[in-house]
Image: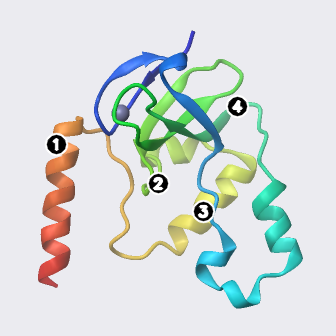
Amino acid sequence: MLIVHCPVCGIEGDETDFHCGGQAHIARPATSDPANITDTEQRDYLFMRFNPKGLHFERWRCDRGCGKWFHAARDTASLEFKAFYGITELPPADVMKQASGQWAAFFKQATASKPAGKKTATKKTPAKKTAARKAASAKAKKS
Ligand SMILES: [Zn+2]
């Protein structure tokens, strides 16, 4: 049994209370430049997925709680979860450093091209995270 923790509402339950939505961090090519999508980009978006033995990053949905999607870092060999973080966030820096292969290359590119305002997940309680989001939102409105 996998014990999953929702970083949005804070509930914890086994995997039957949640729904795994496959690989995390898949960018839809039509979002950035819909007029210039190649067949290869569309094929990769629809069908090509990482399948590592070891640390993997997945989307999960909190079915019996808040209903929100979030990300989880999980070791596919030991099934141990390493982190849970928001759907718009990158994993905590220490977890990203443990990634290897395709994931290491992905995070290297993602952090290199990361806009200044985009944040990395930190290990906070859900209440503190909500307060941090409100503070970040208020800060963004001022500038
Ligand atoms: Zn939830």
Q: Quadrant of residue 23?
A: top right
- Nearer to the camera, 86 or 78: 86
Residue tagged 3: 108
Q: Which mark is residue 118?
A: none
Q: Which residue is mark 1?
A: 128
Residue 75 x/y as whole percent: 63, 28
How far apart are the alpha carbons under marks 3 and 2? 11 Å
Mark 3 lies on a secondary structure that is helix
Marked residue nearer the N-terminal end (4 or 2): 4
Residue that carries the numbered disc 4 in the rendered image: 54
Write down the residue under mark 2.
Answer: 90
Nearer the observer, disc 3 or disc 2? 2
What's the residue type where badge 4 is placed? Answer: Gly
Residue 119 drawn above or below residue 73: below
117 in relation to 99, above or below: below
Residue behind label 1 places its C-beta within 8 angstroms of ligand 1: no
Which of disc 1 and disc 3 is earlier in sequence?
Answer: 3
In percent of width and height, residue 49 lies at: 78, 49
Question: Going 16% across and 78% down the picture, which residue do you hit?
Answer: 141
Image spot of residue 106 (x, y percent): 65, 59
**Sequence-first disc among 1 and 4:** 4
As shown in the figure, which amino acid type bears the numbered disc 1? Lys
Dot 1: within a 10 Å radius of its alpha carbon, few (fewer than 14), some, or many (20 or more) residues? few
Q: Secondary structure at mark 2?
A: loop
Mark before the other along the chain sequence, 3 or 4: 4
